Image: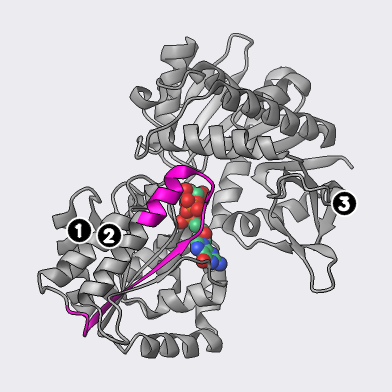
Amino acid sequence: MSADLLIVANRLPVDRVTERDGSRGWRRSPGGLVTALEPVLRANDGTWVGWPGLAEDGDDEAYEPFEDDGMKLVPIKLDASEVEEFYEGFSNGTVWPIYHDLVAKPEFHREWWDAYVRVNRRFAERAAELAAENATVWVHDYQLQLVPQMLRELRPDLLIGFYLHIPFPPAELFLQLPWRRQLLEGLLGADLVGFQLPGGAANFVRLVRQRVGHKTHKDLVYLPDGRTVKAAAFPISIDAAGFEELAAGDGVAARVKQLREALGNPRRIFLGVDRLDYTKGIYARLRAFSELLEDGRLDVEDAVFVQVAVPSRERVEQYRILRDDIERLVGRVNGDHGRIGRPAISYLHNSVPREEMAALYRAADVMVVTPYRDGMNLVAKEYVACRLDDDGALVLSEFAGAADELRQAWLINPYDINGMKSALVEAAEADPKDLSRRMRAMRKTVRQHDVRAWADAFLAELSSIAGSSHDKQVR
Ligand code: GDG
C-alpha cells in the first residue's frame, strides 16, 4: 500500500464494535473531520492512519489495515500503559490544560513525556512506510506534535502539513512546559502549521523566534537548513449542507414536537451540548440559569434547560470530579425549583444520535455555548445551520474560536456570571425581527465557510508551498 495523501490523526474515523453474533466489525464514527476529508481521501487514493480507540486487547485482526466504504484505514496499536501515559496522561493531563488557558492544573510527569515520544515515533514510522514518494501527509492535533519532525527525518521528500484543532497558547503559558523546545521543533518539521485563529499562529511564530532563535517574518519561519515553515489560521467548520438536510427531515420535525411536549411545552427551551469537559463552562452556565430561577427572572413553568453532557475521558480524575460537581448542582437545582413532571434542568449524561442532535437544535430557543476556552466549537455552528427558519438565539463565549465569525451571537464572558445571566434573559426575550436578522447573517457565514472550504484551503496552501519550493529547485 502506498499513498499519495496520508491523514495521520490520533483516532481513526471508525469504532470497533461487537455484532450480535459475536463477530467484530467497524462502525463509522460520524464527525466533521471525516466528512471533510472523505472526498479528498477518495479523490487522491488516500489513507488514514490512527488509533482505533482500544487498549490492546488481543483482538489482533483489529490492527490489520482495511477498507471501509472506500476509505483505506491503517490502525496503530497502543497498549494499556500507553493509553494511560500518552493519551490520558501527556495529551489530556499536560497539553490539554496548558493549551486551554490553565482552566485546570496541568501535571508534568517524565514518564508521560517518554510515552508521548514513543507513540509519536510509532505514528511517524508507520506514516513513513505508507507514504508514496513526494506524497502529502496531513498530521492532526495536539496528540501528535512531534510527528512532523520525526517524519521529515525519515522521509525528507514528503510535503507535511500539521493542523492544531485546539488553541495554541501565549508564551506565558506555553513556557511552563518542560519539553517546550522539543514540541516547537516537532511542529517545525511541517511545511505548513495550521491553527484555528490568527492569534494561535502569531503565538507560535513569536515563540519560535524567541525560544528556538529562528528568523521569522510575518507568518514565515526561516530554518537554518534553508527550509521555510508557514504558520497560518484555517478556522474549521461543519458540513453545513449536511446539517441543513438532516434538520429538514420529516422525522426530525416530528421529534421536535415530541421533545417540546415531553418537556411540558415550555415557552423557552435553553440547550447545552458538550463533551463533559472542564473547558466547556457547563457548571457556570447551569449556575447562571439556576440563579435566574432563584431571582424570579425565569420560572420553571415557562423555561427549561436541556443539557447533554457527553461522557469524555472518564478515567482522568479532573473529569470525574467535574461530573460529580455538575450532577450535584443539577440535583440541587431540580430539588429546589423543579415540580413533578417539570424539571428545571433536563440532564443527560450520554451521547445522542445525530438525528436527535438536529431535533434538539431545532427545538431549542436559546443555544448556550459558554467555554472558558475552545479552539472553535462546532456545536455553535451546527445550531446555526439547523435553524432553517432563521429563528433562535445563540449565546456564545468570547473565548470560543467561533466567536470570531459568529459576531451576531450574544457574546458573553463566561467568568462574568451576571453578564451571562443578562444575556440569557435578553436572548430569551429578544424581538423575533432581531433574532431573524442575527440568525440570517450567521447562517450565511456558516454556509459560506463550510468544512469542505476549510480542507480545500489548507490543502491548497500546502500544495502552493510544494509549488514554490519546486520552483526554487528548478531555478
Ligand atoms: C475539538 C476542539 C474544535 C457532541 N455530542 C454529541 C455529538 N457531538 C458532536 C458535535 C460536534 C462535536 O461532537 C464536538 O465538537 P466541538 O467543536 O464542539 O468540541 P470538541 O469535541 O472539544 O472538539 C474544538 C473541534 O475539535 C474541531 O476542530 O471545534 O474547539 O476542542 O460536531 O455535534 N454528536 C452526536 N451525539 C452527541 O451526543 N452524534
How far apart, in angstroms, are the residues tagged by discs 3 and 2? 45 Å
Q: Position of residue 224 (x, y in %)?
A: 59, 8
Amino acid bearing label 3 = Glu
As drawn, 293 above or below 328: below
Q: Position of residue 318 (x, y in %)?
A: 42, 44
Identify which residue, 189 or 350, lies in the foreground.
350
Marks 3 and 1 close (CB-CB < 8 Å)? no
What mark, if any, has residue 285 been given in the picture? 2
Q: Quick one: label 3 or label 2, which is nearer the N terminus?
A: 3
Q: Residue at x 66, y 29 (%)?
A: 147
Question: Magenta span covers which residues?
Answer: 299-324
Q: Determine whether, in the image, residue 259 is placed left or right of residue 35.
A: left
How far apart, in angstroms, are the residues tagged by discs 3 and 1? 51 Å
Quadrant housing the N terminus: top right
Question: Callout 2: helix, strand or loop?
Answer: helix
What mark, if any, has residue 61 been given in the picture? 3
Q: Position of residue 161 (x, y in %)?
A: 63, 34
Question: Callout 1: helix, strand or loop?
Answer: helix
The image quadrant of residue 168 is top left
Q: Residue at x 62, y 42 (%)?
A: 460
Residue 199 visible to the viewer:
yes
As drawn, 157 above or below 333: above
Amino acid bearing label 1 = Met
Q: Position of residue 283 (x, y in %)?
A: 31, 56
Q: Nearer the viewer, mark 2 or mark 1?
A: 2
- The count of marks equals 3
Identify which residue, 324 or 408, lies in the foreground.
324
Residue 408 visible to the viewer:
no
